[in-house]
Image (cartoon, rainbow, N blue to C red):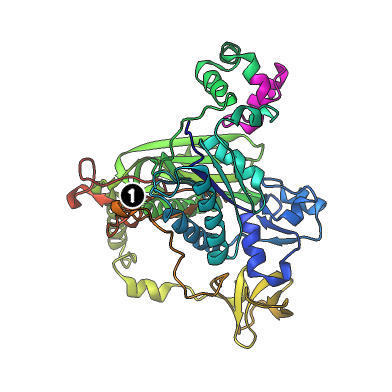
Amino acid sequence: MRAAPTILHLDMDAFFAAAEQASKPSLRGKPVIVGGLGPRGVVSTASYEARRFGVRSAMPMAQARRLCPNAAYLVPRFQLYRTISEQVMQLLGRLSPLVEPLSLDEAFVDLEAGGVAFGSAAAREAGERLRRDIRAVTGLSGSVGLAGSKMLAKIASEQAKPDGLVLIEPGTERGLLAPMPVRILPGVGPATGEHLRRAGMTTVADLAEAGEDELVRLLGKSHGASLYRMAAGHDDRPVVAERDTKSVSVEDTFDVDLHDRVRIMTEVGRLADRCVQRLRASGHSGRTIVLKVRRYDFSTLTRSETLRGPTDDPGVVREAAGRLLDSVDTTGGVRLLGVGVSGLADYTQEDLFAQAAEELAAEGQAAEERGEEEPVGEETPAAAAEAEPVEDPAQRRWLAGHDVTHAEYGPGWVQGSGVGRVTVRFETPTSLVPGRVRTFRVDDPGLEPSEPLPLVETTEPLPLVEKTETETATGMETGIGMEMGMDGKVETVAGAGTPAGQESPLARRPKSRSEGGGPGSGATMSRP
């Protein structure tokens, strides 16, 4: 525990929904709900206007529509959210080399390590300056909590919402925590909370009065002792800039149960490719392939296979995932599929790449024996390009909330689509009034998908933080990258504390042993 509130926790306010409101003038001040719009979709983020109707994150979208039928329901735009997150994390990196991202919109910062603050007044000033800079750079608001520990800093940021700052002075922890519900403490989920309630403990004060021995008896030695310390206000967890990743995975829930075995196999292959993309983006490879299948009756099965060495080859991962699927009965239907890779490393086992090549060569030899032409492989890009199908404009999916541009009317966003029509509102983040709405055929040749527009038009560099002599002497700059889980949940990644001029670990692809990767090579692992 620190004697000064120099641990900062930033939490962006209703991040996804706020970004959508900032980019769409017609939605400002109105309820906005972002998430999956299918029958089995869930709410990712709801604006504060929508929360007044009882809508919350992780709620089934069907329930949200019943509670707030007049809200704007939008599909997430992860590219936009990642861009904004990178801007925010860059601002945090200018405060300190110790930045611990928790998600796209949330992070801890050690102000003391950056030489920015050693007392309450300086910490408050750093927090207020950060909020101003975030507003100037992104146009969005964030809530800041300041305390002497991570647990209390996170509690403070929750109290500060929306768009505020709360500082908890060291020495006031017990009085602040006492009346709060036990669920406010880290590690107390629904099951543990219910267990404690049955034992007559509903507030943090109840936990402190029960004593460590009673909590150990109820929850076990490790969990009970840790919970007692936190109930007393003690939390000595440091801010960690980089954490090792244990696994990378993606999964999809389908609107309608899949019964066709060929379709299921196709979806597994597609998920394997997406998983490898995330694996490569994080600079890792992995040895263990994991398949997750949730069947029609909500029973969930997992199968895994460990390879001879780590790989990031999509062919190898697809092949392994396909073998795992062969051992699962999908007769009744499948509602969710997932593919993951664990046992991560920062190098690749080269001989694993030969598996896909050998399979392709075997297919070519068999075709030659039958007198057929050799199948097209990756080494014949011209032929592959000729075989690539031309996109049919009529088959495009116009997702609600996504960006488009029209040859005549300019940039806009999709309000909705169906029965062969798509409705577009033409406005930009800097529009002073809501834009006009027009409807087109889904195959209109003048309508094209487009990239998200920046929320703030500026050519000014990011605000600089006045550095103390300690910070200047270190010569440290930070680069934080973020990734979004393919299941819609956000995940974190690091790269903080990279010396100026040095390449971030996230910028590197996994190296083979022959390229100098692997243990002892000096390569580092970071959280994707």
Residue 132, quarter of the rendered image:
bottom right
Name the magenta segment's main secondary structure. helix
- Mark 1: amino acid: Thr
- At which x and y percent is residue 234? 52, 27
Write down the region rendered in magenta.
Answer: 183-207
Residue 421 lies in the magenta stretch: no
The residue at the far bottom in this view is: 408
The residue depicted at 71 percent of the width and 24 percent of the height is 202
Residue 401 makes an appearance in the image: no
Q: Is residue 505 left or right of residue 486?
A: left
Front residue of this view, candidates 145 and 498: 145
The residue located at (71%, 46%) in the rendering is 59
Q: Residue 189, how many percent across, how many down?
A: 62, 30
Return the residue at label 1: 470
* Residue nearest the observer in this picture, 82 or 282: 82
- As drawn, 309 above or below 72: above
